[in-house]
Every structure is written in C-alpha cells, then in structure tokens.
Image (cartoon, rainbow, N blue to C red):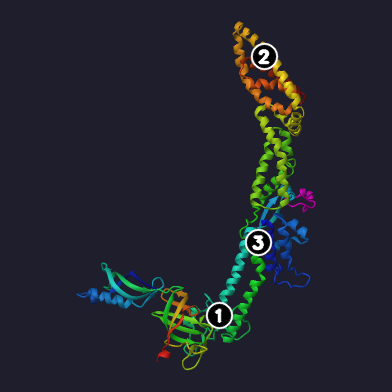
Amino acid sequence: MFFHIVLERNMQLHPRHFGRDLREKLVSKLMKDVEGTCSGRHGFIVAITGIESVGKGLIRDGTGFVTFPVKYQCVVFRPFKGEILEAVVTMVNKMGFFAEAGPVQIFVSNHLIPDDMEFQSGDVPNYTTSDGSVKIQKESEVRLKIIGTRVDATEIFCIGTIKDDFLGVISDPGTNA
Amino acid sequence: MSIESFNRLVKLAARAFYDDITTKGDNQPKSGRSDNRGIAVVILDALTRRQWVREEDLAKDLKLHTKQLRRTLRFFEEEKLITRDHRKEGAKGAKVYNSAVAATVDGLQNGKEGDDKIKMHTHSYCCLDYAQIYDVVRYRLHRMKKKLRDELDNKNTVQEYICPNCAKRYTALDALRLVSTEDEYFHCESCNGELVAESDKLASQGSTDGDDNDRRRRREKLEDMLHRVEAQLKPLMDQLARVKDLPAPEFGSLQAWEVRANAVARGANGDNGNDSKSGQGLGFGGTPMPFVGETKVEVAFSGLEEKGDIKSEVSVTPMKVLPPWMIKEGMNLTKEQRGEVKQESNMEGTSAAAGSSDDKKSIGFEDVKNIQDEYIKAYYEALFKRQKEQEEATKLLPETSTTDGVYNPSTERQVGMKSKREEEDEGEDVEWEEAPPAGNTTTGNLKVDLNVQADASEDDNDEEDDIDWEEG
C-alpha cells in the first residue's frame, strides 16, 4: 500500500557545496540517499515529492560538514499481510516462484500454487495447468495475495499465494509473444 | 435439567479426548498390568455424580491409589476441566465438608465419623467446572477443525523447510536467502545441504516430498480425516449445541458450596439438624435463624439446578414449616410480651386452632345465632341500665372521666386481642360476649365495661405467666 507522508532526515553537506545552489545540492543529495531505501517502519521510500522545510545548519567541529535537518514529503510503499498485489515473476523453481512488486520481493511456494498447476522443468522452468492454458514463467504477471511479511530494519520480504479466487496469471508473455 | 445435559457432555468429551490418557510417565514401561488408560474416563464419570469431593474420598470410592488419582486430577486441572481447592483443616473443617456432602450426595458417605481424629492436614478437593468444560471442549473442537481445514486448503500456512543434514529449519520467509545460483533448490545456510519442504504433520508420512502425487494423496487424507472428525465427534457437537443455551451448573468455591449445601440440608431437615443448639436455647430469638437458612436455599437453586430430589424435598418442607410462622407473626403483633407462651401455643394451636374454630363455627352456627340474638337482647337491657347508672355517676363524680382516658388505650389493644383469641379460645360464650360490643363501641360506657373484663382476663394470663416463670 502506498502512503504519502512527511519524514525528517539530518543531511550532512560537504563545505564545497556551500554557495548559490546549496539548496539544490541538498535536495539532490537527499534524493540520492533516501529514494529506494527501505525502513521497516515506513516501508520502501519510492519518491520524494517535495521539501517541507530545511532547518538551520550546524557546522561540525573539525570536519566543516554542516548538518541540516530536512523535512520532506515522500511516497512510501509498505506491503501488508492480506494485501492483493500485482507482481512480475522473476524466478521459477521447483520450490515455487519469486516475484517482484516494485521494490518488494515476494515468494510463492509451490503449495500455495493451485493444485492443478504442475512444475515443468526445462529451458524455461514454469508452472502449467494440465491443459496448458495457463502458464507461469519468468516475466509473467501475476496477481497474488500476501500471506506473510518479514520486516527487518532495512528489508521487507513477503510470501504470497495465488491459491485463491481471482488470483494467478493476469497476462502471459509466452502467449503474447 | 441442565446438569444432566452437562454431565452427558462431560462423559462424551471424556470418551472422545481422554480415552487413552495414561498417567504413567513415558519412561516407565507400559506393561499390561500398569496400563491405566481409561481411568481418566472413570474419574470424570465419577465426578459427574458428585459436586465438590475430597480427593481421598474419591480415591476410596474408586478403589484407586490416591497418588494415581492426584496425577490424573492434576492433568484435568491443567486441561481446565476441574477446579481444585487445597486447604489445611482439622476435624472441624472436615465436619463442615462432611455435612455438606451428606446434604448433597446421599449414600456416598461412608464412615466419615472416624475422620474426627484428623489433626491439621491439607486436604484437596476437586469439582467439575462445567462452564469451563463447555468452553474447553468447544475450543478444542474448533482448533482441531481449523488445523485440518487450514492444511486442507493450505490457507495462511507458511511453508517450512528443513535441512536433512543438520535439521535446521527455515520458513518460506527465508526463501530469498536460501535460493542458490547453481540449481533450483533451496540450500541450507550452514551446511549447504539441499532443503526439503517439511511435510504436513498429519498426513503424508514417508513419501517423497514436493511430489504432485504426494500432494494429492495428502489432500485426500486430510479430507478423509476431516470427515471422520465430523462424523465421530457429531454426538459431542450435538451435545454442545444442546447445552449452549442452558445455564451451566455452578458450584462456586469450596467454601461457598459448603455453606450452601449445609443451608440446603438445614432447610431439608426442617431446621432441627444444625440449628438445634441455637434454635432451642433462644426460644423466641431462635426463630429468625431457620428463615435465614431458607433464603439461602433459594439462592442456591437459582445457580444450581442440581439434584431434583433435594430440591423437591426442600421446596416441600418450607411449605409445611411456613404456615405456623405466618400465624405466629400475626400473634406477634399483639402478644409481643409473651414470647415463650407464643411458641408453645403455636405448636399446639396452629393446626388445632385453625381447624377447630372452623369446625365449631360450622357445627354450632345455628345455635350460636339464637344464642346471639337472645344475648343481644339481654345485653342491651343491661347496657341501658348501665348507661343510666353511668350518667348518674358522671354527674356525681367528674373523676370517672379521667379513668375513662386511662382505660382507652387498653381498649384498643383489646380489639386486637379478640381477633386472636377467636382462633385460640375454646370458650365461645366469652367470645360472643365480647364480640358485639366491639361493633357498638360508639357508646362511651361500653368501654368501661369492656376494660373491666379485659383486665380481668389479662390479669389471669399474667398470673399464669408469673407462675410459669417461677417454676422455670
């Protein structure tokens, strides 16, 4: 689930950036530092949408670095248990398959894949129904439900299921191509 | 009767879940002799026939060793089926319990009199906790079915993986770390062994894992198991449904139960059992005691729909006992000063008085009427005479009016006395003498007349009383 929230961060800026475009430098450094990171508390920081305020800088003794407390608005993505997500399959193996929904990795184990889909090893490992009409392989798009999340300080990992109504493949690159 | 339904529930649950419980430790070899499976069912059944029971007595009744019984009871306590109470008590506490038992469980009392020698010992008591049993059984069934269903459609289950080499366990949440670059299997972090998905604990033992055939077989097994659970536990579930809206029998804590059971016993014995000491000695003051006991009995019934026999017994006996009291209370209003007399007269009087007065009325009704008429005539003549005399007297002596005033209150009391005496007194003539004036009290002179008579009668009574006291 996406949220638009305000976060705060203390930015350290090298003295060489002090000048006319100090503010731009600060913002670009913030984006570089923060975007794409993950915190267990807020989830993945997808994008910074604006700067709320930049506080007074504090010069560090010895180094000359200046610390600015910056408040910024950002979009965060936080997966929740029970949430339905659309994801792209990245890897298929005997144990199940991995998929990505943006920054989050999701594993669907083989017992959470419908019983009528069977693993086919080979050049392109995939899960296929007995009549071959539905196939899950790399790059397939699937709709899945998150049934468990593992949230570390800097990492979020999910396990999902496609063994439920309206879940499973939503577009199959194999048939389209 | 809710107790029976609940007992049936307990019995069904005992047979369903505690059939093969053995209290022996696992380290002991189970020979045929020491195999005590099924004893749990016996104990639970025995408890359904009792309320609070001392564990030693239960052991004696079941011909079990106390230790063995205790072990099973402790197990049941952990299972939340029974409540136990331990307390240090001497002969007195045991007595209280014994009398309570005697009140509740007829015929289960075997030679408790010998226990009077007991010094201070810790005794354990146990009792079924019906309300909790109901919840426990329901919860157990719910968990069983939920577990099966979850495994059946693999809902909300996180697949677990196990390393066959080092037995390290992983969950699907660790999958990202476990996936290896060389092949498509998960590998153990510590020994790089190939992980296998842990198979369901309930189904699919000893088969290759991850196989689709295996998955199907496992599914069938689970379905079968679920159906069998449904079928075999149906009686239990039906019983649960039946019991659902019934109030669970509640015995309360051991102390509360003892107090209540003793109160029931007192009520049932017509308060000559335990009340004998207090009731006899205090005469008048003793009377409220049984009444208190009786109200307690009522409370007990609201909670415990136990033992129909006792209930009926009790509900009948107060009926017998109560009427005398009602009459007694009526007397209390007027004859407060005579507590002793009242109680005695009560015993004879109540049944006799009420009945006899009625009889007399019906038998001699016609005669009485005639007598009444004649008497009234005679009385009016006498009255008239009296009036004249009175008038003359008042003219002569103004002091008499003061005497009138003095007598007035006593006349009022007299009216009350009369109604009472109608029930008691044998001498009808006297009664009738008094009755008509009661209606004609309008004339002031009558009062004087009445008072004279009343005083006389009262004096008589008082004299009798005095004599009694002297004798006592």
> Please, what is the three-letter code of the amino acid marked with disc 3?
Leu
> Please, what is the three-letter code of the amino acid marked with disc 2?
Leu
Q: Position of residue B348 (x, y in %)?
A: 76, 32
* Secondary-structure class at tag 2: helix
> In front of the other: label 1 or label 2?
2
Badge number at residue B383: 2
Q: Quadrant of residue B354?
A: top right
Quadrant (top left, top right, bottom left, bottom right) of the C terminus of chain B: top right
Which chain is home to disc 3? B
Task: State whether discs 3 and 1 lie on one chain.
Answer: yes
> Is B212 contained in the magenta span?
no
Residue at x 68% of width, y 30% of height: B331
Nearest to N terminus: mark 1 or mark 2:
1
Q: Is residue A75 above or below residue B126?
A: below
Whether residue B79 is visible:
no
Residue at x 46% of width, y 80% of height: A167
Front residue (pair A128, B14): A128
Disc 2 + disc 3, Cβ < 8 Å: no
Badge number at residue B81: 3
Front residue (pair B294, A134): A134
* Secondary-structure class at tag 1: loop
